[in-house]
Each structure stands twice: as structure tokens, then as C-alpha cells.
Image (spheres, rainbow, N blue to C red):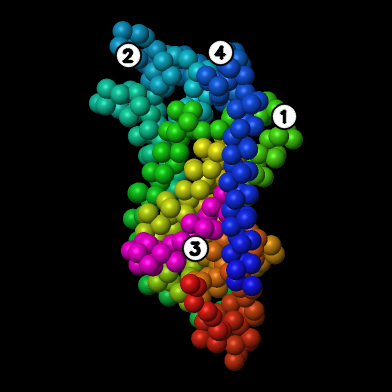
Amino acid sequence: MGVMKKSNGLSLLVVCVMVCLCSGAWWNNNSTTEEQDDVLTATLDSTSIPFPGRGWLDTFATVPSNRMEWKGTTFGSAYDVLFDGHPEDHVVRNFNAWVNSWIFSPATVAQLLHKTQSIEWTHYLLCYLRNLLGGILVYYGTSLIFHYHIYIHPRSQQIFHDRERPSPAIIWDQIKLAQMSLFIYTALPVVDEYIIEQQWTYVYYTVAQIGGWPFHLLSMLVYFTMVEIGIYWMHRTLHTNKFLYKHIHMLHHKYNKPETLTPWASIAFHPLDGILQASPYVLCLFFIPCHYMTHFVLLFFTAIWATYIHDSMDFNVDPIMGSKYHTMHHTHYIYNYGQVFTFCDRFWGTLRVPQGKTGVKASVGGGDSPQTSHSKKES
């Protein structure tokens, strides 16, 4: 039986590799020569730039004080400098710069350009600062919402009438660890944006570039499936590799009881832990076509999802890898490695379905607690 499971697992991995290779080959075969030279911007001109277009740049240019001289050329604003005046040639950068413009004024960008004397350093520094600010807002915003509904709302009396509440000390420990991790963890999306803007991936920006909605939806399915498998194996490796577990992943697993798991634990980890587990979102882009906005939204979604699966509550809908499943992972270590779905754990034999109410000892309410549940060591 063990040999059969390993054989099935190897077969699935081979299939996954073939899917990735076929996806890349399909993209190459269905791209015109112009698209291969410039995948994201082929056939685009200044009047047909995809969202957000160039209207936002034109708005900045109407303000005389925004105009900037850069290497002998006058631009409408410092943001225009980032594209050398041609956003149609940089549609992904155009989107990132537009998002940045909601936070940083053209005057701020101009100051950075003068200090760094580099368009690239300025652009990616702005992206990092934006990601850091966004990560802080998402972390504290989602955690506060979950915190209110779990620990403050009147229903919390019912939730914790027969189980222990997390202590303020635990929550404060998680906040400090998460905040320290954010400074490094939020650098991964900058690397992600760089390789996409350099056109080293199979990322596309418009549905037309992939051949229409059917191919777009198919590419989304393949991408998300491969990411889920990649995260499963990365997470599992962080447990089975003794060096990685001891020096990187174990820090997150000090929260190993239901009463030590809270929404604030979502990114309370070693920053390399978070980067490694999120890396399949980036690595799959080298092999599988993916819409940029789909990729962008998924990165945002995972931050919220991580808050949910660490709240140690009982809401689950199979085949979703909900918080009850992930609590079992933290208490038993060798089960439920998946991120969003249970299919990887089910296929590779590491799924454990939790029984009873979370945090309640079996002798009290039938809960599947660490003290009463048997487990096996993973070889």
C-alpha cells in the first residue's frame, strides 16, 4: 500500500510537470513573433493602453508644478519618467505605478529620482514601500475584524464557554513577530513584480492575449492547481527537512494549541518561512500562463485566507482546508499541509479530519485534542 501511494504521488508529480511544460509550449506556439518580442504590449498604442490607461498620467501633467526635467527631457510628471513617456510599452509597470500614485505624490517620486538617479531603484523602492504599507493594513485590518467577531462580539461568550481563550500575552507575541516578519516578507512581491515587468514569465495582461475567456479560465484553473500543489510540498518539506523545520518553520509552530492560535498568528513566522511557502505563486509564472490581475488578486487573497485559517474556529466547508483543519495541523504537525483545499492531503495520505469542537477536550465535548488523539510520525 505504501509503495502504491508513493507510485501514485510520483505519477501525479510527473503529470504536474508535464502540465507546466505543455502550458508553456502552448503559449509559445500561440504567440505571434511580435508577442514573443514584447508579450505584454504587442499591438498596443498610446490610445489603447489597458487599465488604468494613461489618463491618470495626463491628470498629473495638467499641474505645472508636477512637470519634471530628466536627462534633458521634460516630462508631465515624475511618474511619466518611469516609462520614459511611453506607458504603452510598460503596461504592468503602468498598473503598479498607478497603484503607487494613490500613496506617493509626483513630488515624492521626483525627490527619489534625484536621490537615486535611477528609474529602476526608484520604481521598485516605491513598490516595496507600498507593499509594506499594504501588508500592514491588511494584517491589522483583517486581524482586527476577526478579533472583534471572535473575542469581543457577544457570541464570544458562547464560543468560549467551554474552552480557553487566548491570553493577551500570546496575541501580543504574535503581533510583534508578524510585524518584524513583514519588513522582509513584503519584499517577495517586489521580486515578483520585477520578473514580470522584465517579461521573464508567461504572465499576460489582457484576456485577448490568451485567446479569450475559455483559455483564460483554463489557465486560471491550471495555475491555481499547480500553486496549491507547490505550496503543499513546500509546507510538507518545511516539516520533514530537519534543518528547515528547526531553523525556519518551528518558530511558527510554537503556537501548537487551540488557545495559542489566533487571527494574529497568520504571518507570525520567520520571514523566510513566509517567502518559501508563497514562492509557488512566483515560480509557477515561469511555466504557466496567468493573467496579471488574477495573480495580483490571489496574493491579496492569501493574506486574508491566512488570517482565517489561524482563528481556531470551527467553520469548515469541505473540500476547503478551513481553520479547523489548520488547527489540527498546528496541534498534530504531520497532517493537513494544504493551503486552500484538501485534495493534496487526501491524495498523498496526510489528511486528518478533525472531530468535535475545537479546543474542547475529548472527555468534555468530544473534541479531537492533541492530548487524546493518536498520531503517527512522518518518515
Which mark is first along the chain, 1 or 3?
1
Quadrant for residue 229, please give it. bottom right
The label number, if any, that marks residue 212 in the structure image: 1
Mark 2 to mark 4: distance in Å? 21 Å
Residue drawn at x 51%, y 33% as measured from the top left = 201
Residue type indicated by callout 3: Arg
**Which label was assigned to residue 46?**
4
Residue 264 visible in the displayed image: no
Give the dominant element type of the magenta stretch: helix, strand or loop: helix
Q: Nearer the viewer, residue 88 or 14?
A: 14
List x then y, in percent, for residue 99: 49, 33
- Give the amino acid type for the residue marked by disc 1 in the picture: Gly
Residue 303, numbered circle: none
Mark 2 neighbour class, 10 Å CA radius: few under 14, some 14 to 19, many 20 or more: some
Pointer 3: residues within 10 angstroms few (<14), some, or many (20+)?
A: many
Disc 2 to disc 4: CB gap under 8 Å: no
Disc 4 or disc 1, which is closer to the eye?
1
**Residue 70: which disc?**
2
Q: Do residues under tags 3 and 1 come within 8 Å of each other at their CB atoms?
A: no
Q: What residue type is labelled 2?
A: Trp
Check disc 4 and give the amino acid type: Ser
Mark 1 closeness class: few <14, some 14–19, many ≥20 residues within 10 Å: few
For this orientation, the residue located farthest to the left is 115
Q: Which of 57 and 315 is in front in this view?
A: 315
27 up-or-down from 265: above or below: above
Residue 307 location (% of width, % of height): 52, 59
